[in-house]
Image (cartoon, rainbow, N blue to C red):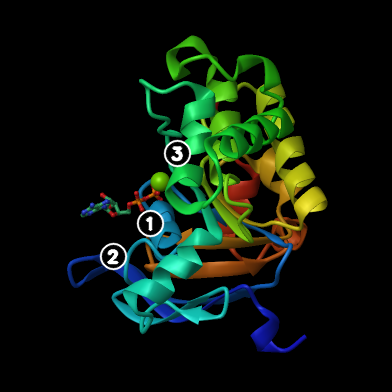
């Protein structure tokens, strides 16, 4: 495959706030239909990187291509076109608390789709059924469990049939069984729709189950210290921190 077939590509990327990089010299690519896990200790810059990769924030340096669009040079209109093909689940899931699950999923549809309210309703119901929430569509976020809220957030990220979705800590705070069910859902979305998925996760079992590739961010060096299939990284004894990440005792 040529580099041009990638759906996400960054070259010597630096991300951070103001002119202060949190992470620098990041270079990797992702092919369509693959699942990439961004891992590393708390506060190392995973969410910051994810927002840049997803076109929500500008990098400090380097290049980033999402869906073949150069995010640094894109006009506002080009960026909007790219963002329409991209779904996001932010850390903490952040559903609108005063809206039902269906209304939450309908929001991006109302904004971007030129179809009737009845069709939007039908599409939203389909997305919620897809994530196993057919019976909870009229509930408010306060009336559902944490696992259900993550599912609803994923349904909303899938609202516009995106090519790629970014999931920031989808399994954080979930018990192992709920977390495993969420992994199955993520794999199902990829299998059914070919969706490319970038996720942040701390859960080693979940990373091993879902991710094709893994980027490890090291806060001590301020850059990525490993990139590859998780099973390869797991067996590599040469990088102590990456090894410790995979073999640390599970904290629950
Ligand atoms: N809006 C912001 N302004 C300035 N610094 C921030 C902001 N958001 C996060 N940071 C800092 O950037 C670093 C990386 O944060 P973050 O990307 O949230 O880490 P992670 O997701 O890996 O836990 C942290 O030191 C954090 O305090
Ligand atoms: Mg984060």
* 205 in relation to 245, above or below: above
Q: Is residue 191 left or right of residue 47?
A: right
Assess whether mark 2 and mark 1 are in contact (beta carbons under 8 angstroms).
yes
Q: Residue at x 53, y 58 (%)?
A: 86
Determine which of the numbered discs, if any, sits on residue 107 in the image: 3
Per the rendering, the mark at residue 200 is none
Q: How far, Cα to Cα, is label 3 from label 2?
A: 30 Å
Q: 44 or 200, which is in the foreground?
A: 200
The answer to whether one can see residue 187 in this image is yes
On residue 16, the disc is 2
Query: Of tags 1 and 3, which is closer to the observer?
Result: 3
- The reply to whether callout 1 and callout 3 are in contact (CB within 8 Å) is no
Quadrant of the image occupied by residue 203: top right
Spot the residue most to the left. 18
Say if disc 1 is inside 8 Å of ligand 1: yes
Q: Nearer the viewer, residue 184 or 102?
A: 102
* Mark 3 / mark 2, whichever is N-terminal: 2
Measured from the top left, where is residue 46 in percent x and y? Answer: 43, 55
In percent of width and height, residue 117 lies at 53, 36
Q: Earlier in the sequence, mark 1 or mark 3?
A: 1
């Amino acid at each position: 495959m040529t580099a041009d077939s990638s759906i996400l590509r960054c070259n010597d990327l630096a991300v951070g706030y103001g002119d202060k990089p949190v992470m620098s010299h990041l270079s990797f690519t992702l092919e369509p239909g693959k699942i990439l896990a961004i891992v590393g200790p708390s506060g190392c810059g995973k969410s910051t990187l994810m927002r840049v990769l997803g076109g929500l924030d500008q990098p400090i340096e380097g290049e980033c291509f999402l869906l073949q669009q150069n995010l640094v040079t894109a006009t506002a209109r080009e960026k909007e076109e790219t963002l329409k093909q991209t779904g996001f689940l932010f850390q903490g899931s952040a559903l609108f608390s005063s809206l039902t699950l269906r209304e939450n999923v309908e929001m991006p549809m109302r904004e971007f789709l030129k179809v009737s309210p009845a069709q939007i309703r039908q599409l939203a119901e389909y997305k919620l059924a897809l994530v196993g929430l057919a019976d909870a569509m009229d509930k408010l976020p306060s009336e559902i469990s944490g696992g259900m809220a993550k599912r609803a957030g994923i349904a909303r990220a899938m609202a516009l049939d995106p090519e790629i979705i970014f999931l920031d800590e989808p399994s954080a705070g979930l018990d192992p069984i709920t977390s495993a069910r969420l992994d199955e859902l993520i794999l199902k979305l990829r299998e059914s729709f070919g969706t490319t998925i970038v996720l942040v996760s701390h859960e080693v079992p979940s990373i091993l189950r879902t991710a094709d590739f893994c980027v490890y961010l090291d806060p001590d060096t301020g850059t990525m210290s490993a990139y590859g299939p998780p099973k390869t990284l797991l067996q590599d004894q040469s990088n102590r921190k990456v090894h410790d990440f995979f073999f640390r005792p599970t904290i629950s």
